[in-house]
Image (cartoon, coloured by chain):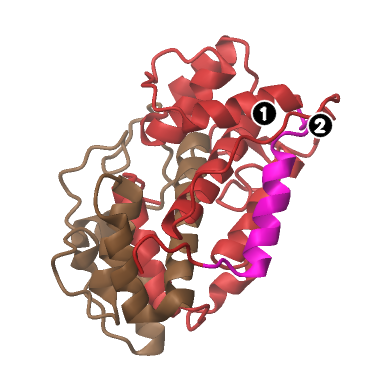
Amino acid sequence: MLRASAHQTGRPVELSAISHPDRDSLLPAGRELLAFTTALIRGGGDLSGARDRLCESVGIAGAVRAAAVAGNFQMMNRLVDATGVPIAPTLRAIADELDLGGRSRSGALTQNGGNTSRPRS
Amino acid sequence: MGDQVLDAPTKIGDVIDAQWRGLGEPGTWLDGAQRVAVVRAARSESSVSAAAPDSIEDVARLVAHRAATITAQTVDAIEASGIDRTTYVEIVGIVSRVTAIDTFERGIGRRPRALPDAVDGTPTRAMLPEARRRAGWVATVGAIGPPTALSSVGREAADQEALHDVLYLSYGGMSDLDADRGLHRTQMELVAARVSLLNDCLF
């Protein structure tokens, strides 16, 4: 959806920043959004500081929306993983683009020979 | 700003408040006390193995903390332990929403909410005969996908959709690639992608 939205609206985006947040995503406040999201999901870091810097970049409404979107995808990740929603084969290319080739996730990045992993659509 | 709590829009706050109260009410397959136990377990830091979860609390911890390790065999084992798949769906729905709400509120600087009060009453046991297994590991009304993954338990599906709407976009609104809700759609998707990567979720 990120690539589709960027393409549709003529905004440049560097997708590798998703897996390498030290890189420039080319999106406004990209570094602050990634730093806030990482601190929020991983915990143990300076979430308060990341929130402050995000507010300075996108305003309070933007920071609240970032927290809301993060919360939503915490929900969505769990429900698709727990119910076996099929992963489209096209995600393999996206995974490669995001440098996720080394990840092993119950068959998500490999061909499944009718095994018990997530079914492919 | 220090530890200032950011104000949540009224619409988000109202939905979350209502859903939090609802977590303690009798559900479709779990009573109020059981639903609160699921909430408590989802927030617990206890480790859990995907090998043999055999209680609603174990299942809650698994979904909360290790959802990426769940396989079809895991769900089979859960069912074999006596937790049928529609109860499992209810647990998945509760845990997913609790995680969303806790994450959002932590993100805006709030402390975790107190557990909801357990309300007496009987679960509805509302079966949906049109729900059936297709692809995926649980029955759904229609093809399985993010909007329908919880559809065998109508209340959980409705609550999940309502939360999705206020936190992110309505399902109908997802076709608007130029949406702006405080952040532009591209910025929202950047956050979404980073969360999914950190959760080891490729979807």
Q: Amino acid at mark 2?
A: Met
Instruction: Indicate whether residue B203 is drawn in magenta.
Output: no
Quarter in which the N terminus of chain A is drawn: bottom left
According to the rendering, which colour does chain B have?
red
| Tag 2 subunit | B
Instruction: Indicate whether residue B17 is drawn in magenta.
Output: yes
| Residue at 31% in and 56% down | A47
According to the rendering, which colour does chain A have?
brown
The mark tally for this picture is 2
Q: Between residues B147 and B2, which one lies in front from this camera angle?
A: B2
Where disc 2 sits, the SS reads loop
Rendered position, A9 above or below A72 = below
Q: Amino acid at mark 1?
A: Arg
Q: Position of residue B188 (x, y in %)?
A: 42, 70
Query: Which residue is labeled 2 in the image?
Result: B127
Q: Say if residue B30 shows up in the picture.
A: no
Q: Say if residue B34 shows up in the picture.
A: yes
| Tag 1 subunit | B
Q: Between residues A76 and B41, which one lies in front from this camera angle?
A: B41
Q: CA distance from mark 1 to mark 2?
A: 18 Å
Q: Earlier in the sequence, mark 1 or mark 2?
A: 1
| Residue at 63% in and 48% down | B148
The answer to whether dots 1 and 2 both sit on one chain is: yes
Query: Which residue is labeled 1 in the image?
Result: B35
| Residue at 60% in and 44% down | B149
Please tell me in which quadrant of the rendered image residue A44 appears: top left
Where disc 1 sits, the SS reads helix
Q: Position of residue A86 (x, y in %)?
A: 46, 45
Q: Residues within 10 Å of mark 2 (few under 14, many from 20)?
A: few
The stretch in magenta equals: B7-30
Q: Position of residue A62 (x, y in %)?
A: 44, 75
